[in-house]
Image (tube, grey):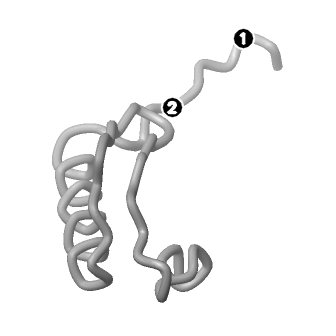
Amino acid sequence: MGDEVPRSALNGEVALRLRDLIRDICGAHDVSILKGHVSKDHVHLLVSIPPQVTISRLLQ
């Protein structure tokens, strides 16, 4: 059990598509991406969100 290697899900075309989706969604809500990085198993984002946009609405 402890010898399992974690699978990398966010690479290649999947990572590029995810990046494009994040950019599109943020653009649609007037959210500025200050920094971002797609890793093999997670995403880091630093964004500037206008006051009228709730975090929960953005993440839907």
Please name which of the two marks, 1 or 2, marks the residue nearer to the observer: 2
The answer to whether residue 17 is left or right of residue 41 is left
For this rendering, which residue is in front, 15 or 24? 24
Residue at the (54%, 85%) spot, across then down: 57
- Image quarter where the N terminus lies is top right
Q: Residues within 10 Å of mark 1 (few under 14, many from 20)?
A: few
Up the image or down, 2 lies above or below 45; here it is above
Q: Quadrant of residue 54?
A: bottom right
Residue at the (26%, 52%) spot, across then down: 14
Q: Secondary structure at mark 1?
A: loop
Instruction: Kindly identify the amino acid type of the residue bearing the numbered disc 2.
Output: Arg
Residue 50, percent from left and from top: 41, 76
Residue 11, percent from left and from top: 28, 38
Up the image or down, 25 lies above or below 40; here it is below
Q: Residues within 10 Å of mark 2 (few under 14, many from 20)?
A: few
Residue at the (31%, 41%) spot, across then down: 35
The answer to whether residue 53 is left or right of residue 47 is right
Instruction: Kindly identify the amino acid type of the residue bearing the numbered disc 1.
Output: Asp
Q: Identify residue for label 1.
A: 3
Q: Secondary structure at mark 2?
A: loop
Q: Identify residue for label 2.
A: 7
For this rendering, which residue is in front, 25 or 3? 25
The alpha-carbon separation of the residues under discs 1 and 2 comes to 12 Å
Residue at the (45%, 41%) spot, across then down: 44
